[in-house]
Amino acid sequence: MGRLHYICLKPASRAALVGLGGVGKSQLAIEHAYRVRDRFKQEDRRVWAFWVHANTRVRVEEDFKRIADIVEIPSRKQPGVNIL
């Protein structure tokens, strides 16, 4: 948990949790998201956490497009623009 927290302290940081099924990746990510949310809420700052399903390339692309809609990336709907 400490290493994940340290990696994610920098602005616009990101981390990937990889490992065999059942070792606790999802639980670690959820716990980290709650801790970060609570910390930044106290500081009256905004922080975003997104869950990206990476089992197929199609799912990754779908999830990133969904994120682009949520955070309203300006060029996300322009023809010929690849937000990925």
Image: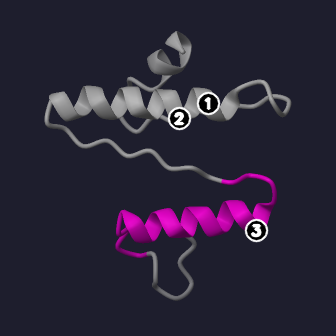
Please name the predominant secondary structure of the magenta segment in the image.
Answer: helix
Crowd rating for badge 2 (residues with CA inside 10 Å; few <14, some 14–19, many 20+): few
- The answer to whether residue 31 is above or below residue 65 is above
* Quadrant in which the C terminus is drawn: bottom right
According to the picture, the residue beneath numbered tag 3 turns out to be 58
Residue 55 seen: yes
Q: Is residue 16 left or right of residue 13?
A: right
Whole-percent x, y for residue 82 in the image: 57, 72
According to the picture, the residue beneath numbered tag 1 turns out to be 27
According to the picture, the residue beneath numbered tag 2 turns out to be 30
Residue occupying image coordinates x 78% and y 24%: 23
Residue occupying image coordinates x 14% and y 36%: 44
Tell which tag, 3 or 2, sits nearer the viewer.
2
Whole-percent x, y for residue 65 in the image: 55, 69
Whole-percent x, y for residue 47 in the image: 32, 41
Marks 1 and 2, Cα distance to the nearest angstrom?
Answer: 5 Å
Mark 1 near mark 2, Cβ–Cβ under 8 Å?
yes
Q: Nearer the viewer, residue 13 or 28?
A: 28
- The answer to whether residue 60 is above or below residue 15 is below
Reply yes or no: does residue 8 show up in magenta: no
Question: Which label's residue is closer to the chain start, 3 or 2?
Answer: 2
Reply yes or no: does residue 69 show up in magenta: yes
Q: Is residue 61 left or right of residue 67?
A: right
Which stretch did the figure color magenta?
53-75
Farthest-out residue, right: 20
